Image (tube, coloured by chain):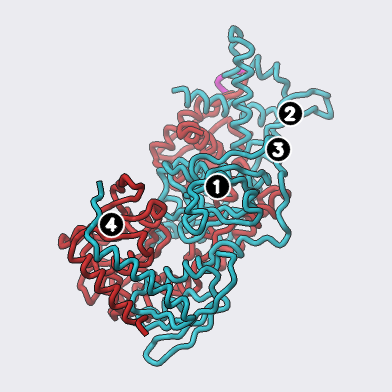
Chain colours: A red, B cyan
Amino acid sequence: MADSAIATSERAVRILTMIPLIRARPGIKIEELARILGCSPRTVLADLDAVLMCGVPPYLPNDYVGVCVEDGGVRLDFAGHFRRPVRLTLQEALSLRLALDSLPLVPASGAAKLRGRIERLLPTALRSRARTGFRVIPAARALHVKLRRLSRAVAENREVFISYYTASRDALTERTIRPYGLVELRGEWYVVGYCLLRQRELPFRVDRIRTLKVLPQRFTVPADFDIERYRRAEMYFPSGAEVQVRIRVAADLASRVRRAFAVPKIEELPNGDLCFSVRVSHPEWLLAWAIQYGPQVEILEPPELRTRMCQFCNQLLSIYAH
Amino acid sequence: MAAIRKNERWLNLVSFLLKMGRPVPWEVIRRDVEGYNAPDECEAAVQRRFARDKAALRAMGVPLEYRTDAEWGITGYYIPPGSYSLPVLNLTPAEVAVLAFVARAAAAHNAAVSPAAVALRTALQKLQFDSPIPGDVRTTVEERYLFHQSGVFPDKTSREAAVLEQLTVAVLENRAVKFTYRAVVGEAAREGPAARTVDPYGIAHWRGHWYVVGRCHERKAVRCFRVDRIVGAVSFARRGKGGDFTVPVNFRLEDYIGRPPWELAARAPTRVVIRLDEVVAWMVAEERQSGDRLRRTPGGGAILERTVSDPEAFVHWLLRFGAHAELLSPQHLRVRLADEIRRVRALYEAPVQREG
């Protein structure tokens, strides 16, 4: 289906929900409608224009739905036959259930019940197929435990002491952070906050937190903190001191590369291999990243990093020398 | 502007049929309802339009039926109010709080117009008819968390979304599908992209990726396919209404998805022992698999015993820990690991191959 066709039917469904909503709550504010419907007040007004054109034969004045907007509130007349929204479609019920299953921070008490209710909305014949055929496989339990504890610290504005694996330094470090919020990016969870060790706001990957302890100390989130700043293609914030690294990979590793880096451009080499450049501040971690793919990955530039890779290989080989 | 007219036509039709509350013959719709009642318009064109509108409304969940009225014997189009309406769902405050989380996650994808993203939005609108999310619950959630890019909500441009839609239908209707697949591990990878026919038993999302699991006709066994490695479109293998296969009663998606790569090959299992230092031992411990035996050593390290069926995948997994991990046994795998490292070193001892 083309985008425009999808958008048209989305609008129709929204209007079929909006009409009974206004009927049930006469005088409801435009802003409130926009909030419930998850759209802008402008969209609500445009939808109301369409509602005005909705009528039944013989299309006399009283056969059209009457829309009255007063002091920002809306009332409808002659819409008595629109009592409730349309039942959920299969696709809607499934989307809702998958969304529920995919959010580890959803309060567990309500989630199980809501999941059950949604399932009962599906046609009986499809219930068991929907249950066996669609699943979000949860991440490791350890990650869930850490996420829950962090979300409590976020909600209560409490400092957290963490032992953290810094990939760029390939080492464990300890520090206290002020967790401002939690962000998910391409399947990875990050806690974003002020790091008392580095004295600045940083994202930390939750799965690299070895241990965490919620401290009694409280903090206030600075007024200029904006979690939207982390709505981006990658979690890496360049410092300006980056080195350019050029890497060749076998063609079938393209999706791994896209997972590991937000690479603007991947070139194809004449032999079918792929080639790309990344700018990183501590290129050392690329050695372990590259070697896990064996000869399918090769760092081409800079020459110093190639020399480091030789040393890295020798270091590993010394372990296996006996 | 055509879109607006289409919307008005749909609304008029639903409005009329809901108001009538009994079957309405096509002739009456043709004569009276705006959008179909132009007397000078070609009959075939109006009927085609009506057929399209019927399909569109049904896809939106409107139960538009064609039936005979028992009382009057009139045959026509009817929307039964009972099956049209969303059942009353008075959600508890705890359930509304959950809904607020989902709404927040969906809001990050507000611009997406894929069918899955739209379905989630309209579902949230409908559920709020009886149980609106209060403003304060919403703000608390919004200020604190940002859910972003989770692959569960496919984005507008992704071809993956279209493939998923098709696979969803195939799973629900038990229809065999055909597609071209590019494998990345094992022999299949060396053979390149290949045509597959699959009975899709289920779809799962794991760690940012969608997978379809089903019986592969070519391999005559249950296989997992990552949806983003499907090349091009997915088509149904057979015509008809589905029911091409039955799902084995004991089938569980969890048995196939979320398994580590070293368990995927169907070869004879090998027991391996590795030593991990304190920097990485806890990471491995957190992702422990059933059958692993982990013994902690003083200073935070660990000795891990594990059964692997794909030594090649295992060796590569181990290499990512660099000098923090050592394979202790079996000896033949140690040799293999060292050979792999030597092959890598050889690349770097030679000058860079000219790229062009």
Quick one: label 2, few (<14), some, or many (20+) residues within 10 Å?
some
Q: Residue at x 67, y 28 (%)?
A: B17
Task: Give how far apart the Cα atoms at labels 3 and 1 are.
Answer: 27 Å
- Do the residues marked 1 and 4 share a common chain? no
Residues rendered magenta in the picture: A58-62
**Image-quadrant location for residue A156:** bottom left
Q: Amino acid at mark 1?
A: Ala
The label number, if any, that marks residue A247 in the structure image: 4
Q: Amino acid at mark 2?
A: Tyr
* Residue placed most toward the observer, B302 or B146: B302
Task: Give how far apart the Cα atoms at labels 2 and 4 are.
Answer: 63 Å
Q: Chain of mark 1?
A: B
Reading the image, the residue beneath label 1 is B123
Check disc 4 and report its element: helix, strand or loop.
strand
In the rendered image, the vertical position of residue B26 relative to residue A208, given as above or below: above
Q: Amino acid at mark 3?
A: Lys
In the rendered image, the vertical position of residue A207 relative to residue B32, given as above or below: below
Task: Give how far apart the Cα atoms at labels 2 and 1 are.
Answer: 26 Å
In the rendered image, the vertical position of residue A113 relative to residue B69, given as above or below: below
The label number, if any, that marks residue A172 in the structure image: none
Quick one: label 4, few (<14), some, or many (20+) residues within 10 Å?
some
Looking at the rendered image, the disc whose residue lies closer to the viewer, 3 or 1, is: 3
Check disc 3 and report its element: helix, strand or loop.
loop
In the rendered image, the vertical position of residue B95 relative to residue B76, given as above or below: below
Looking at the rendered image, the disc whose residue lies closer to the viewer, 2 or 3, is: 3
Q: Chain of mark 3?
A: B
| Pointer 3 with pointer 1, Cβ within 8 A | no
Sequence-first disc among 3 and 1 = 1
* Residue placed most toward the observer, B14 or A305: A305
Reading the image, the residue beneath label 3 is B241
Q: Chain of mark 4?
A: A
